[in-house]
């Protein structure tokens, strides 16, 4: 037993389960790569101020959940709790928005960190795939991202998820709603922290998961009743484009999401098989975030989908992913000359794209064949001194049990033909 264990609220990805996570990341990113999104990778930590300004100083993420620290040089940094602010910062720093091709379309994959109470589906270290379209205000862009996420989930075989959709208005109409909501909240029986939050960002109170709070919000004013004509028209076009694409969604007038930077379109993907942690992903439009972090006006939209929770959703639906075998061919040498010859053949097989492995450690035939079985290989190559003297190796089909002699110099071509 090791002296050390993974920190509380974290996990290790270990074969064979890690293959599921890789497959989920691949499936989520595939529609993005086919739609003009380029890959971006940002540091695992950023300035604390980047998240305080962008995510919002009143959010739980900034006030309670961020891993913040001061470096030896006096810099105040934080492990990234989400991806959008970092990606936008990187795009601005590299002047991608000045290249003349807007929107700038980016996708990313990585680990994020929040100090939360660990439970199934909620970790202190978690994995997401995200997408951002920076620098264009167009309902078609909002619809595109929702459709691509739906496509990604369905390609994995998921069907029991729902898309919740709402509009949060803009700088013209949201202040009017904000004032009306604050008036309503002041009349409720709320604790001091919640009342303080209501004064800073009352929409965050709507996102409060406590039953004692939710019971009092039944008659709260709804943002949809305060939307200006421009926001109504914008939202209706998003709805029409999604519907025309055959993507089902539910209007949720109380959906606000947990970050301060959202405007207009906001959406969430939920899976009812995950219990209290039902959100598997979400996102929305954030037209003012660039200005919040010191950049020019760049209307943008994006989402992040949780890899961990998507895997849990697949398990909840009983979906078994078709994962490629890590090994197609396993080589078993019997003797030193066979080790030299078969190792060379394994190298050749790998060069032509065939997944091949080798029996290391000078095991006997029985032990080596056990390893071959465990590897999941479709074929095993066995060779001893007598085989090599005749210029052949023994090729065994691990499914049928059939075995045949194949010329040493023909084995690579034979396996290429059999494995397609």
Image: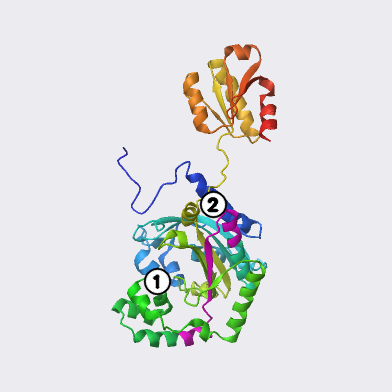
Residue 160 magenta: yes
Secondary structure, mark 2, is helix
Determine which of the numbered discs, if any, sits on residue 59 in the image: 1
Of badges 2 and 1, the one in the foreground is 2
Residue 312: give x, y in percent of width and height.
46, 54
Q: In the rendered view, would you say 419 is above or below 409? A: below
Q: Judge from the rendering whether residue 344 lies leftward or rightward of residue 309; answer left or right.
A: right
Q: Judge from the rendering whether residue 408 lies leftward or rightward of residue 196; answer left or right.
A: right
Secondary structure, mark 1, is loop
User: Label 2: how many residues lie within 10 Å, few (<14), some (14-19) or many (20+)?
Assistant: many
- Nearest the viewer among 159 and 144 is 159
Can residue 362 be seen here?
Answer: no
Place residue 400 in its image quadrant: top right
From the image, which quarter does the C terminus lie in? top right
Span colored in magenta:
150-177
Q: In the rendered view, would you say 90 is above or below 392? A: below
């Amino acid at each position: 037993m090791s002296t050390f264990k993974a920190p509380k609220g974290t996990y290790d990805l270990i074969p064979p389960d890690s293959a599921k996570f890789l497959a989920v990341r691949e499936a989520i990113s595939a529609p993005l790569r086919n739609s003009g999104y380029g890959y971006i990778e940002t540091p695992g930590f950023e300035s604390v101020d980047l998240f305080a300004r962008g995510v919002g100083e009143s959010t739980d993420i900034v006030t309670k959940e961020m891993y913040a620290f001061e470096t030896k040089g006096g810099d105040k940094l934080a492990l990234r709790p989400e991806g959008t602010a970092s990606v936008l910062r990187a795009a601005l720093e590299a002047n991608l928005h000045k290249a003349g091709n807007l929107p700038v379309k980016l996708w990313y994959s990585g680990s994020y960190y929040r100090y939360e109470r660990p439970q199934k589906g909620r970790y202190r270290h978690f994995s997401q795939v995200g997408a951002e379209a920076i620098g264009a205000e167009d309902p078609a862009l909002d619809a595109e991202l929702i459709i691509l996420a739906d496509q990604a989930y369905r390609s994995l075989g998921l069907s029991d998820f729902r898309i919740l959709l709402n509009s949060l208005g803009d700088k013209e109409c949201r202040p009017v709603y904000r004032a009306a909501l604050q008036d309503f909240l002041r009349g409720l029986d709320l604790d001091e922290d919640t009342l303080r939050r209501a004064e800073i960002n009352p929409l965050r109170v709507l996102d409060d998961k406590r039953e004692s709070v939710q019971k009092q919000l039944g008659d709260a004013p709804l943002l949809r009743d305060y939307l200006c004509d421009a926001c109504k028209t914008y939202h209706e076009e998003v709805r029409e484009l999604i519907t025309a694409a055959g993507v089902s969604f539910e209007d949720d007038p109380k959906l606000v999401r947990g970050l301060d930077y959202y405007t207009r379109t906001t959406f969430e993907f939920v899976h009812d098989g995950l219990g209290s942690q039902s959100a598997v992903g979400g996102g929305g439009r954030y037209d003012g975030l660039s200005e919040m972090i010191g950049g020019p006006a760049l209307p943008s939209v994006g989402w992040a989908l949780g890899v961990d929770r998507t895997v849990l959703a697949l398990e909840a639906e009983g979906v078994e992913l078709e994962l490629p075998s890590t090994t197609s061919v396993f080589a078993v040498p019997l003797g030193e000359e066979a080790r030299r010859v078969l190792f060379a053949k394994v190298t050749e097989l790998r060069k032509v794209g065939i997944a091949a492995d080798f029996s290391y450690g000078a095991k006997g035939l029985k032990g080596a064949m056990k390893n071959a079985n465990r590897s999941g290989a479709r074929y095993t190559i066995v060779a001893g001194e007598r085989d090599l003297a005749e210029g052949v190796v023994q090729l065994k089909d691990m499914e049928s049990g059939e075995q045949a002699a194949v010329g040493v110099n023909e084995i690579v071509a034979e396996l290429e033909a059999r494995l397609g």
